[in-house]
Image (cartoon, rainbow, N blue to C red):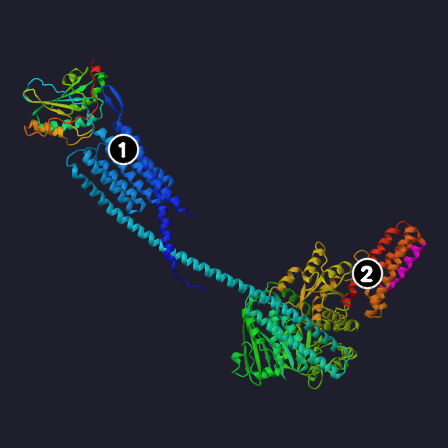
C-alpha cells in the first residue's frame, strides 16, 4: 500500500533539508581543512650574516614534523637545480627533544650531495636566525645580505612547484624575482621558553 | 478457448517489471555503498594516521589536523548517504546523495594524501561504483561534484588537489575531461544494460502473459476433462441402471414364459407362449447388443486374461444352440483337436459371446444342411498355440458386394435380411471389435446359396500343466478299447473318430447299420467293447441297430451310446432292451461323450461279469437345498418355480441380511444371491458370509445373479467371494447349467445335507415336512404356521408350569410338542422336547436348561418360517 502523497512530500522535504544541512556541514569542514592547509607558520626575522663567496641558503627543520618530508624533497630538487652555485645548510632544531629524534631527518637530508646538516641541540642557532616554523628557508647573497625568506612548499606537506623555490632559483641565477618572501608551512619550532 | 498471443497489457507489465528490477538494483547498490562508504571512511582515518598522525610545536606533539579531518569531516561526509541508504533505499535522492558523498570522500582522500595524483584514481573507481545504480544521472551528479571540487580548490588551494600550484587555473578542465571520458563509457554501458533489462522484462511479460493464457487454457481443459469424466460416469451409470432396469422385467417375461411353456396348454396357448418367449429372447439379444456396443464405443469393455478351456466354451455354445439346430433338422458338428484341450489364457466370456453370435447367425441363416464348428491348429509352440476356429454353414450365403461391409455397425447383408431374420446388425460388429480387443482376427468367406464360413484366428498362450495330466489318465484308462462308430455323415464320423482316438481307443467305422452289423459279425478275433452310433441313419436307425445287436449277437453283450440330432426320445424300456447306456444330443460335448463311453465300457464289462445294466447319467441336482436371495417378487417366483422344477428345495429371502441370518440357522447346498437388494446387498452379504467362514473349512457356494453389464462387475463379485455368477434375465436352463456346473463341488463337500453341526439333526427335515404337506407348498406353510401358533401357547403354559414346579404338566406339554415337531420334521426341537419330557419325568433340575433349549429351537423355527413366507408376504 502506498503512503499518502502529503506524507511522502513531507518526508522528501525533510530529506532535502537534511541534504542541504549536510552539504553545508561538509563544505564548512572542507573549508576549515583547506584553511589549515593554507595557513603558514610564523616567518623568521632573517638577520644579515657573514659574507661568503657564494649564495648561502639556511633551511630550518623540526625533526618530527610531517611537512618536513615535503620540504626535504623540495630542498633536494632545489640543490640539483642550482648545481653547486649555492651553499646549503640544513639546521635541525632539537631543543627540548631527545637528540636521537633528529637521526632520521638527518639521514634523509644527508642523502643529497651539497647539503650541510647541522643539529641545534638547544635551539640557539635557530633562535639566532629568528626561525619559528619548520621549513623556514633564508637565502643570503655573497655579501651576507638576506635576499629571501620563506617556505619552499606551496602548502602543508605538499610537494611540487612553489613560489619560494622558484624565487631562490631566480635569485641565484640573478634573474628577475617575483617575490622575496613566501609563507612557511610546517610545525612550530622550539619557543624561546623551551630554548631557555 | 483463447488462443496464445501477447496481450496489450504486456508492455505495461514490462514497464512494471523494469521498474521493479531497477528498484531492486538501486536498493542493492545502496546496500553496497553502505559498506563502501564505511570502508572508505575507515581507510581515510588509517591513511591519515599513517601519513601524518601528529603535528608539533617544538617538542610538544598533538594530533595532526588531517587525522581529525579524516575522522570528523570523513564521518560527516558519509553520515547522510549512509543514513539514506539504510532509511530510504532505492530513492532517487539517496543515490544522488551517495554520489555526492562518494566524490567528496575522494576529494578528502586526495587532500589527505597531499594531492597525490595517484589518489585521483579514486574518482574513476567511484564512478565505476556509481555505475552500479544503472542511472546516468548519478554519474552526472558525481562528475559535477568532481569538477566543482577541482575548480574551487584549483583556485583556492591548488596544491591540495593537484599537488602543486602550477597551471592550476585550467587543470580542472583536463581532470573533468578525463572524468567525462570515463563517464561516456560508463553511460554507454548503463544504457546498454538498461536496454537489456527492458528487453528481458518484455520477454518476461510476454512469458507471463503466455503463461496466463496457458493457465486459463489448462483450467478450461481441466474443466472440460472433468465434465467429460463426469459425463462418462453418468453414461456408465446410466448404462448400468438401464441394463438393470431392463433385465429385471425381462427376467420376469423370459422366466415366466419358460415356466408357462412347461404347463399344460392347448396348441394355441403353446404357440402364444412360444412367441412371447421368442420375442423376449430377441429383445434381450437386441438389448445386449446395444449395451455391448455402447460399452465398446465408450472404451469400457474390459478384456480379461484368465485360464480357460476353449473346448468347454465351444461345447457350451454347441449345447446352447444345438436345440435350435435340431428344431430345424440341421446337422450340427463340432470338431476340436486334442491340442486345444490345453488350458489357454484368454477371456472365456468374450469367446462365448463371439462364438454364440457366429453360431446363432449360422443357425438363423441355415434352413437345411449342416453347421460345423471346425477348429484347426495353424502353429503350435511350447508356450502358445495359433489356431483358426471356423463356423461353416450351408445357409443362404452373403453376396460378394456385401462382404466388405458385413462387420460394419448396423449393417446386414441387405435390408431384406434384416426384415426377414431380424437382428440389430450389431452382432458381427461386436464380434469384430471383441476379436480385435483380444488381439485376434476375424473374417468371412461366402457364396450366395452355398453358405458362409466365418473364421477367427488367434494365438493364445498356454497355461503350463492344465489338462495334460487328466488327458494322460484318460488315455491310461481307455487305452486299447475297441470301439465301433456308426455314422452316416462323413464329417461327423471324422469328428467322432478324432475325439475317441485321442483317448487311446482303436476305432472302426461304419457308414450305416448294415455295415456295422457286418463288422460286428466278423469281429471274432477282436470283439468290440462299445458301439457309438448315430440315431438317425438311412435304412436302419441307431436304436434298431442296437436292438439287432442284442438279438443277433447276445453273447457279445455289447452296449451302445446313441447320438441324436433330433428331439426324438427313447423310452426307458426300449433303451434297456437295446443295451443303450447313454443317449446324447449332437454336437456332443467331449466331456459328455467321454462319460458316456466310460459308462458304456463299464456297463459292457459289468454285463459280461454281472449281467447288470448301469443306470443312465443323472443330473445330480435332485434335492439340492437352495437359498434364493432376491428382492424382486417376479424374479423370486421365476427362480423358485424353475429351481423346484429342477428338483431343488428352495428357501427365499428378500435381502442380504436375511440371507446371512438364514445361513446361520440352516445349511444350503447353494445360494443364488441377487447383487442389488435393499438393507444389505448381495456383495455385502457375501462378504459377511465369507467372514463367518474364515478359519473354518466351510465354503458356501454362492452364485451371483446380476443385471449389471458394466466392466469391472465380475471382478467386484469375485473379490466379494462369489463363486460364480449368472446374468439376468435367467431361466430354467441358466439355473440348470449353473447348478450342473457346481453340483460336483456341492455334493462331495456336503454328503449329509442340512445336518446340524452338533447332533446331526436338522432344524427342519424338508423331506418329512414335504411328506406331511403332500408336496403342497401353501399347505406346508400353513402347517408350519399352525405348529408355531400352537407351539407358542404351549411354551407359555410350559413357563408357568416350570415356575410353579408342576413337573407333570411340563412332561405333558413336552410330550405334546415332541409329537407336533416330529410331524413337521422339526428334528432338533423334537429332540429338545423329548429331553425335557424325560427330565420332567425324573423331576430333574435340568428341566430349566432343557426348556431354554426348547425355546431356542422354537425361535429358530419361527425365523425359518419368516424366510419361507417372505416372498409370499412381499
The chain under label 2 reads: B
Q: Which mark is residue B620?
A: none
- Left or right, A185 with reference to B850: left
- Quarter the N terminus of chain B occupies: bottom left
Query: Residue B403: x, y in percent?
Result: 53, 80
Q: Is residue B73 visible?
A: yes
**Overall secondary structure of the magenta stretch?**
helix
Residue bounds of the magenta highlight: B808-824
Residue marked by disc 2: B862
Residue at 16% from the left image edge and 39% from the top image edge = B170
Which residue is denoted by mark 1 in the rendering? A28
Query: Residue sitting at 46 percent across and 60 percent down?
Result: B216
- Residue in view at x 25 percent, y 30 percent: A32
Name the image quarter holding the C terminus of chain B: bottom right
Foreground residue among B538 and B309: B309
Secondary element type, mark 1: helix
**B642 w.r.t. B34: above or below:** below
Q: Quadrant of residue B503?
A: bottom right
Residue B762 appears anywhere in the view = no
Specify few, some or many for label 1: CA neighbours under 10 Å numbering under 14, 14-19, or 20 or more: few
Q: Check residue B816 for magenta coloring.
A: yes
Mark 2 packing: few (<14 Cα in 10 Å), some, or many (20+)? some
- The answer to whether dots 1 and 2 both sit on one chain is no
Residue A135, compared with residue B86, is above or below; it is: above
Please tell me whether residue B505 belongs to the stretch shown in magenta: no
Secondary-structure class at tag 2 = helix
Where is B516 relative to B632, above or below? below
Can you tell which quarter of the image residue B602 is in? bottom right
Mark 1–mark 2 Cα distance, whole angstroms, equals 118 Å
Amino acid at each position: 500500500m502506498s503512503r499518502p502523497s502529503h506524507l511522502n512530500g513531507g518526508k522528501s522535504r525533510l530529506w532535502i533539508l537534511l541534504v542541504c544541512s549536510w552539504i553545508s556541514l561538509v563544505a564548512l569542514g572542507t573549508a576549515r581543512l583547506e584553511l589549515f592547509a593554507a595557513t603558514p607558520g610564523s616567518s623568521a626575522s632573517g638577520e644579515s650574516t657573514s659574507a661568503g663567496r657564494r649564495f648561502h641558503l639556511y633551511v630550518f627543520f623540526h625533526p618530527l614534523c610531517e611537512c618536513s618530508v615535503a620540504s626535504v624533497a623540495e630542498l633536494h630538487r632545489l640543490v640539483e637545480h642550482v648545481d653547486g652555485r649555492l651553499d646549503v645548510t640544513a639546521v635541525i632544531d632539537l631543543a627540548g627533544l631527545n637528540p636521537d629524534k633528529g637521526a632520521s631527518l638527518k639521514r634523509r637530508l644527508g642523502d643529497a650531495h651539497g647539503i650541510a646538516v647541522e643539529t641545534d641541540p638547544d635551539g640557539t642557532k635557530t633562535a639566532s636566525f629568528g626561525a619559528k616554523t619548520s621549513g623556514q628557508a633564508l637565502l643570503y647573497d655573497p655579501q651576507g645580505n638576506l635576499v629571501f625568506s620563506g617556505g619552499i612548499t606551496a602548502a602543508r606537506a605538499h610537494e611540487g612547484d612553489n613560489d619560494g623555490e622558484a624565487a631562490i632559483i631566480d635569485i641565484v641565477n640573478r634573474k628577475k624575482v617575483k617575490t622575496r618572501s613566501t609563507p612557511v608551512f610546517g610545525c612550530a619550532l622550539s619557543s624561546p621558553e623551551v630554548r631557555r | 478457448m483463447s488462443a496464445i498471443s501477447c496481450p496489450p497489457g504486456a508492455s505495461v507489465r514490462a514497464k512494471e517489471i523494469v521498474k521493479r528490477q531497477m528498484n531492486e538494483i538501486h536498493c542493492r547498490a545502496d546496500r553496497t555503498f553502505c559498506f563502501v562508504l564505511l570502508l572508505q571512511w575507515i581507510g581515510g582515518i588509517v591513511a591519515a594516521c599513517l601519513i601524518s598522525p601528529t603535528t608539533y610545536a617544538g617538542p610538544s606533539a598533538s594530533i595532526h589536523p588531517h587525522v581529525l579531518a579524516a575522522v570528523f569531516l570523513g564521518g560527516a561526509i558519509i553520515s547522510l548517504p549512509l543514513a539514506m541508504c539504510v532509511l530510504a533505499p532505492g530513492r532517487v535522492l539517496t543515490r544522488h546523495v551517495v554520489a555526492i558523498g562518494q566524490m567528496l570522500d575522494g576529494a578528502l582522500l586526495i587532500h589527505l594524501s597531499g594531492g597525490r595524483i595517484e589518489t585521483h584514481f579514486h574518482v574513476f573507481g567511484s564512478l565505476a561504483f556509481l555505475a552500479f545504480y544503472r542511472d546516468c544521472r548519478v554519474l552526472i551528479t558525481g562528475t559535477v561534484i568532481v569538477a566543482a571540487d577541482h575548480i574551487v580548490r584549483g583556485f583556492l588551494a591548488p596544491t591540495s588537489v593537484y599537488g602543486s600550484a602550477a597551471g592550476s587555473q585550467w587543470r580542472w578542465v583536463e581532470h573533468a575531461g578525463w572524468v567525462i571520458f570515463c563517464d561516456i563509457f560508463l553511460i554507454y554501458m548503463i544504457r546498454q544494460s538498461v536496454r537489456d533489462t527492458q528487453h528481458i522484462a518484455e520477454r518476461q511479460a510476454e512469458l507471463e502473459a503466455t503463461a496466463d493464457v496457458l493457465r486459463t487454457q489448462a483450467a478450461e481443459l481441466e474443466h472440460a476433462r472433468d465434465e467429460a469424466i463426469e459425463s462418462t460416469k453418468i453414461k456408465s451409470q446410466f448404462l448400468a441402471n438401464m441394463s438393470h432396469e431392463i433385465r429385471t422385467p425381462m427376467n420376469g417375461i423370459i422366466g415366466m414364459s419358460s415356466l408357462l411353456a412347461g404347463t399344460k396348454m392347448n396348441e394355441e396357448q403353446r404357440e402364444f407362449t412360444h412367441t412371447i418367449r421368442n420375442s423376449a429372447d430377441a429383445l434381450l439379444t437386441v438389448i445386449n447388443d446395444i449395451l455391448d456396443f455402447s460399452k465398446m464405443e465408450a472404451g469400457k469393455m474390459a478384456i480379461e486374461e484368465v485360464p480357460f478351456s476353449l473346448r468347454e466354451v465351444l461345447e457350451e455354445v454347441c449345447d446352447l444352440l444345438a436345440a435350435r439346430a435340431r428344431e430345424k433338422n440341421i446337422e450340427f458338428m463340432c470338431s476340436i483337436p486334442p491340442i486345444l484341450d490345453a488350458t489357454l489364457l484368454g477371456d472365456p466370456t468374450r469367446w462365448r459371446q463371439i462364438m454364440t453370435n457366429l453360431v446363432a447367425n449360422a443357425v438363423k441363416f441355415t434352413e437345411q444342411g449342416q453347421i460345423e464348428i471346425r477348429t484347426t491348429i495353424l502353429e503350435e509352440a511350447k508356450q502358445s498355440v495359433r489356431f483358426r476356429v471356423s463356423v461353416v454353414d450351408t445357409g443362404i450365403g452373403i453376396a460378394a458386394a456385401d462382404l466388405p461391409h458385413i462387420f460394419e455397425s448396423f449393417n446386414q447383408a441387405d435390408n431384406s435380411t434384416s426384415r426377414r431374420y431380424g437382428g440389430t446388425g450389431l452382432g458381427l460388429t461386436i464380434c469384430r471389435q471383441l476379436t480385435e480387443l483380444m488381439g485376434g482376427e476375424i473374417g468371412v468367406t461366402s457364396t450366395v446359396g452355398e453358405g458362409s464360413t466365418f473364421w477367427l484366428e488367434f494365438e493364445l498362450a498356454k497355461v503350463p500343466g492344465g489338462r495334460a495330466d487328466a488327458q494322460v489318465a484318460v488315455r491310461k484308462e481307455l487305452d486299447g478299447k475297441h470301439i465301433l462308430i456308426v455314422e452316416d455323415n462323413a464329417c461327423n464320423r471324422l469328428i467322432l473318430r478324432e475325439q475317441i482316438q485321442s483317448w487311446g481307443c482303436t476305432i472302426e467305422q461304419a457308414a450305416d447299420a448294415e455295415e456295422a452289423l457286418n463288422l460286428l459279425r466278423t469281429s471274432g478275433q477282436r470283439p468290440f467293447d462299445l458301439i457309438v452310433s448315430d440315431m438317425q441313419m438311412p435304412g436302419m436307425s441307431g436304436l434298431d441297430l442296437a436292438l439287432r445287436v442284442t438279438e443277433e449277437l447276445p453273447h457279445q453283450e455289447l452296449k451302445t451310446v446313441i447320438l441324436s440330432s433330433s428331439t426324438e426320445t427313447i423310452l426307458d424300456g426300449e433303451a434297456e432292451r437295446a443295451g443303450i447306456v447313454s443317449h446324447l444330443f449332437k454336437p456332443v460335448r467331449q466331456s459328455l461323450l467321454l462319460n458316456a463311453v466310460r459308462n458304456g465300457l463299464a456297463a459292457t464289462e459289468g454285463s459280461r461279469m454281472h449281467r447288470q445294466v448301469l443306470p443312465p447319467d443323472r443330473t445330480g441336482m435332485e434335492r439340492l437345498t437352495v437359498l434364493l436371495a432376491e428382492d424382486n417378487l417376479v424374479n423370486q417366483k421365476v427362480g423358485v418355480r424353475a429351481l423346484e422344477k429342477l428338483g431343488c428345495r428352495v428357501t427365499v429371502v428378500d435381502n442380504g441380511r436375511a440371507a446371512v441370518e438364514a445361513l446361520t440357522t440352516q445349511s444350503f447346498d447353494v445360494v443364488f444371491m441377487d447383487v442389488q437388494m435393499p438393507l444389505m446387498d448381495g456383495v455385502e452379504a457375501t462378504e459377511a458370509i465369507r467372514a463367518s467362514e474364515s478359519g473354518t473349512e466351510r465354503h458356501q457356494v454362492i452364485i451371483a445373479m446380476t443385471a449389471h453389464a458394466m466392466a469391472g462387475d465380475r471382478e467386484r463379485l469375485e473379490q466379494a467371494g462369489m463363486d460364480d455368477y449368472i446374468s439376468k434375465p435367467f431361466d430354467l436352463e441358466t439355473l440348470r447349467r449353473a447348478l450342473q456346473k457346481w453340483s460336483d463341488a456341492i455334493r462331495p463337500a456336503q454328503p449329509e445335507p442340512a445336518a446340524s453341526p452338533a447332533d446331526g439333526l436338522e432344524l427342519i427335515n424338508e423331506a418329512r415336512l414335504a411328506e406331511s404337506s403332500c408336496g403342497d407348498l401353501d399347505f406346508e406353510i400353513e402347517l408350519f404356521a399352525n405348529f408355531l401358533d400352537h407351539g407358542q401357547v404351549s411354551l407359555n403354559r410350559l413357563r408357568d408350569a416350570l415356575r410353579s414346579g408342576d413337573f407333570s404338566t411340563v412332561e405333558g406339554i413336552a410330550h405334546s410338542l415332541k409329537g407336533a415337531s416330529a410331524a413337521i420334521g422339526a428334528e432338533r426341537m423334537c429332540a429338545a422336547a423329548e429331553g425335557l419330557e424325560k427330565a420332567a419325568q425324573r423331576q430333574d433340575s435340568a428341566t430349566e436348561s432343557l426348556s431354554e433349549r426348547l425355546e431356542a429351537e422354537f425361535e429358530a423355527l419361527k425365523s425359518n418360517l419368516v424366510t419361507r413366507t417372505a416372498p409370499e408376504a412381499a
